[in-house]
Image (cartoon, rainbow, N blue to C red):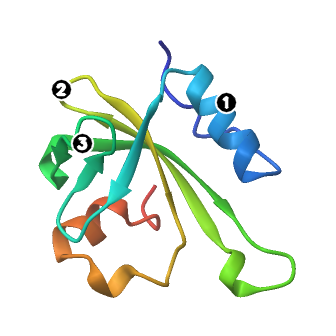
């Protein structure tokens, strides 16, 4: 399995997720206030347990509500997964460590 290509460019969210799945990011991750949760195993990844390998931003043409980010995540335990999140909308529910880990400015 390869690591996500940070320099890749995708036109659609589905194109990005399909490419990431081909690269081995097969788990679906859910965002919780203090961790990421693997939907199939219910395994929790806290900020110290994972790295953001790449992210891809998608902006809606007609509405700011259509904005989203796809994250390629690698866990310290070998898990590789995808987190899809609408950005800006739910950030207030995250704790500080999660905000810092998923922050895009310094990447």
x, y percentage for residue 101?
28, 60
**Cα separation between marks 3 and 2:** 8 Å
> What residue is at 16 percent from the left and 42 percent from the top?
49
> What residue is at 18 percent from the left and 40 percent from the top?
43
**Cα separation between marks 2 and 1:** 22 Å
Residue that label 3 marks: 50
Q: Is 89 above or below relative to 36?
A: below
Rendered image quadrant of residue 30: bottom left
Q: Dot 3: within a 10 Å radius of its alpha carbon, few (fewer than 14), some, or many (20 or more) residues?
A: some
Q: Dot 2: within a 10 Å radius of its alpha carbon, few (fewer than 14), some, or many (20 or more) residues?
A: few
Question: Is tag 3's residue or tag 2's residue first in the polypeptide sequence?
Answer: 3
Residue that label 1 marks: 19
Q: Are marks 1 and 3 in contact (CB under 8 Å)?
A: no
Q: Is 99 above or below relative to 23?
A: below
In the picture, measured across the screen, residue 63 lies left or right of residue 105, that is right
Rendered image quadrant of residue 51: top left
> What residue is at 46 percent from the left and 55 percent from the top?
107
In the picture, measured across the screen, residue 73 lies left or right of residue 55, that is left
Question: Is tag 2's residue or tag 1's residue first in the polypeptide sequence?
Answer: 1
Instruction: State the mark number for residue 104.
Output: none
Numbered disc 2: secondary structure: loop
Numbered disc 1: secondary structure: helix
Numbered disc 3: secondary structure: strand
In the picture, measured across the screen, residue 61 lies left or right of residue 85, that is right
**Cα separation between marks 1 and 3:** 20 Å
Instruction: State the mark number for residue 77.
Output: 2
Q: Is 27 above or below relative to 56?
A: above
x, y percentage for residue 45?
19, 46
> What residue is at 79 percent from the left and 51 percent from the top?
12
Question: Is tag 1's residue or tag 3's residue first in the polypeptide sequence?
Answer: 1
In the picture, measured across the screen, residue 22 lies left or right of residue 38, that is right
């Amino acid at each position: 399995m390869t690591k996500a290509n940070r320099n890749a460019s995708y036109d659609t969210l589905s194109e990005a997720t399909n490419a990431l799945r081909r690269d081995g990011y097969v788990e679906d991750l859910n965002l919780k206030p203090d961790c990421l949760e693997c939907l199939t195993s219910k395994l929790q990844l806290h900020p110290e347990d994972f790295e953001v390998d790449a992210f891809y931003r998608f902006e809606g043409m007609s509405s700011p509500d259509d904005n989203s980010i796809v994250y390629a995540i690698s866990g310290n335990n070998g898990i590789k997964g995808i987190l899809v999140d609408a950005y800006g909308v739910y950030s207030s529910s995250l704790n500080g460590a999660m905000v810092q880990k998923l922050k895009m400015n310094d990447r």
